[in-house]
Amino acid sequence: MVQYDHLANLLNHLVNSRKVRKSKCEFRPFNKLMLAVLEVMKKNGYIKKFEGVKDSRGGVIKIELGNLNFCKAIKPRFNVKKGGFNKYTRRFLPARNFGIIIVSTNKGILTHKEAVEKDLGGRLLAYCY
């Protein structure tokens, strides 16, 4: 079976691991985008730690889960102007000031709150709460 959206598969794997009450999980293969998204999730406490190990089969990420309720990739990846995050926070997050939307900007992978503070727009990747 061919995997087309590796980021969506990773986030789905995290949610499924949490549902069966696992504290650790492994995912293969990985890329720089996944590592950047996991770094944002780690900064916000959704995962405790992760480690990417390269091998001949595309590498493996070892992840220790934190306080994660739900996360999902956003498809299609909507473009957002610098003032347009309110529409998408109401659409994807369950309540105000609860959860994050992960955004790809020209300054790197950020949360929607950091993008608003830095007055940036970007492309929506995922949401977590």
Image (cartoon, rainbow, N blue to C red):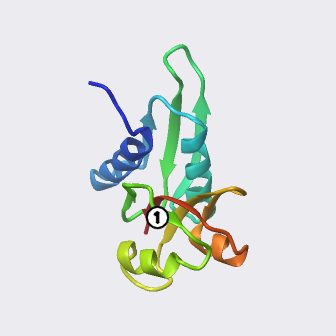
In the figure, 82 relative to 8: above or below?
below
Front residue of this view, candidates 24 and 32: 32
In the figure, 107 relative to 36: above or below?
below
Instruction: Say left or right for 59 vs 109.
Output: left
Front residue of this view, candidates 67 and 120: 120
Residue depicted at 43% across the width and 79% down the height: 87
Give the position of the N terminus as an image quadrant. top left
Instruction: Say left or right for 86 vs 105.
Output: left
Q: Where is residue 46 in the image (x, y as percent from the top left)?
A: 51, 61
Q: Position of residue 104 (x, y in %)?
A: 59, 56
Q: Where is residue 21 in the image (x, y as percent from the top left)?
A: 32, 53
Q: Which amino acid does label 1 sit on?
A: Asn
Residue depicted at 51% across the width and 22% down the height: 58
- Regarding mark 1 in the picture, which secondary structure is present there? loop
Residue depicted at 70% across the width and 75% down the height: 119
Write down the residue under mark 1: 67
Residue farthest to the bottom?
A: 96
In the figure, 127 relative to 23: above or below?
below
Q: Quadrant of residue 45?
A: bottom right
Instruction: Say left or right for 116 vs 89.
Output: right
